[in-house]
């Protein structure tokens, strides 16, 4: 079946308009709260059950939107399947396992490094040297990531593994936005992310269903998983996919500026988590590095 592709939307290389910034604020707030939802869901179900449950709920949510059913050309299905792996199945599996070892606040704060990984992955894929501004921002951001993670590294092997799992998820996200951009430009966000979720549901079902069947549910955990799926896995992903097509993947990743603050606030206020001052400073440095390089494209200089 051949799809009728929508007109390509060229990424904006100037300052984003107000609606574009709204597309970045909404997923940032939702994903900031998602780490609290993950922590609460883990009280009732295992990490693989959280991953499968949120993706299945997200898939069911998007199925209610007529736009999700628009066809996609068969030739683009491999890219959609890859998106289902690197944006959904793999990273969304890493976060619940990580939160068994580190706090929801720290997990959310580490997401401040996401724009840095997007810039690094984009540079490697396109084989282009970054501009001086982006290189400086990446350097500052990586220093912030080190400061952010350093206190937890002293807490033992389990916390170190948790941080490594989070960083692996962030690298995966770095690939995801670049894959999502051309697909969204051709078909729109809904049919792309819905089909990617279908792939992720199939991949996570074999082990995830087992965790769900052995879960010990309570009202808070169940509602948290429902919110995680409907908002964190459906609405937020569609919104950021639209943003990636309109402003480019590096600028779209700026939504993560909001994630650390929201995650920190909810982790401390709702769950009573404690976060070291050095981690908070590192988070601020990380955000500063990403903010410094915002809106700047990678130079078209081949890497030799």
Image (tube, rainbow, N blue to C red):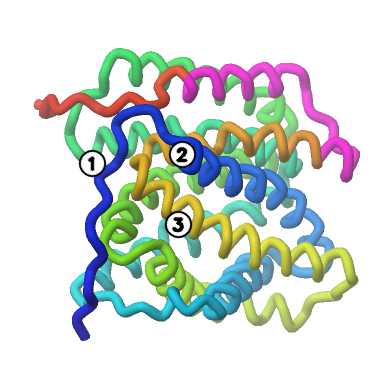
Q: On screen, 137 above or below 265?
A: above
Indicate the position of residue 180 as horizontal and vertical percent values: 35, 55
Q: Which mark is residue 87?
A: 3
| Mark 3 neighbour class, 10 Å CA radius: few under 14, some 14 to 19, many 20 or more | many
Determine which residue is flagged by label 1. 125
Indicate the position of residue 245 as horizontal and vertical percent values: 34, 50
| Mark 2 neighbour class, 10 Å CA radius: few under 14, some 14 to 19, many 20 or more | many
Choose the circle earlier in sequence order: 2 or 1. Answer: 1
Please say whether residue 72 is one of the residues in the magenta stretch. no
Quadrant assignment for the C terminus = top left
The residue that appears at 67% across and 81% down in the rendered structure is 210
Asked whether disc 2 touches disc 1, contact meaning CB atoms under 8 Å apart, the reply is no
Quadrant assignment for the N terminus = bottom left
Q: Secondary structure at mark 1?
A: helix
Occupied quadrant, residue 164: top right
The residue that appears at 58% across and 78% down in the rendered structure is 60
Q: Secondary structure at mark 3?
A: helix
Report the front residue among 42 and 1. Answer: 1
Indicate the position of residue 30 as horizontal and vertical percent values: 66, 50
Q: Is residue 209 left or right of residue 67?
A: right
| Secondary structure mainly formed by the magenta segment | helix
Determine which residue is flagged by label 2. 253
Choose the circle earlier in sequence order: 2 or 3. Answer: 3
Report the front residue among 138 and 8. Answer: 8
Q: CA distance from mark 1 to mark 3?
A: 17 Å
Asked whether disc 1 touches disc 3, contact meaning CB atoms under 8 Å apart, the reply is no
Q: What residue span does the magenta drawing correspond to?
A: 267-291
């Amino acid at each position: 079946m051949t799809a009728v592709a929508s007109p390509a939307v060229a990424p904006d290389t100037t300052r984003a308009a107000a609606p574009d910034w709204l597309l970045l604020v909404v997923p940032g707030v939702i994903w900031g709260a998602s780490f609290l939802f993950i922590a609460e869901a883990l009280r009732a179900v295992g990490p693989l059950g959280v991953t499968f449950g949120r993706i299945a709920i997200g898939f069911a949510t998007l199925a209610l939107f007529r736009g999700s059913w628009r066809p996609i050309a068969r030739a683009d299905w491999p890219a959609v399947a890859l998106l289902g792996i690197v944006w959904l199945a793999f990273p969304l599996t890493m976060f619940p396992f990580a939160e068994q070892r580190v706090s929801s606040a720290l997990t959310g704060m580490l997401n401040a490094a996401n724009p840095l990984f997007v810039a690094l992955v984009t540079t490697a894929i396109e084989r282009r040297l970054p501009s001086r501004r982006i290189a400086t921002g990446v350097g500052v951001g990586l220093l912030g990531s080190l400061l952010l993670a350093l206190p937890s590294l002293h807490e033992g092997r389990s916390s170190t593994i948790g941080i490594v799992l989070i960083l692996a998820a962030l690298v995966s996200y770095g690939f995801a936005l670049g894959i999502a951009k051309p697909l969204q430009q051709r078909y729109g966000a809904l049919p792309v992310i819905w089909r990617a979720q279908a792939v992720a549901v199939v991949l996570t079902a074999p082990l995830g269903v087992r965790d769900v069947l052995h879960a010990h549910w309570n009202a808070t955990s169940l509602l948290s998983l429902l919110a995680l799926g409907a908002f964190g896995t459906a609405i937020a992903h569609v919104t950021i996919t639209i943003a990636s097509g309109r402003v480019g993947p590096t600028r779209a990743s700026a939504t993560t500026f909001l994630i650390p603050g929201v995650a920190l606030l909810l982790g401390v206020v709702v769950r009573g988590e404690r976060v070291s001052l050095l981690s908070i400073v590192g988070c601020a440095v990380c955000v500063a590095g990403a903010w410094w390089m915002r809106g700047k494209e990678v130079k078209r200089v081949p890497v030799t």
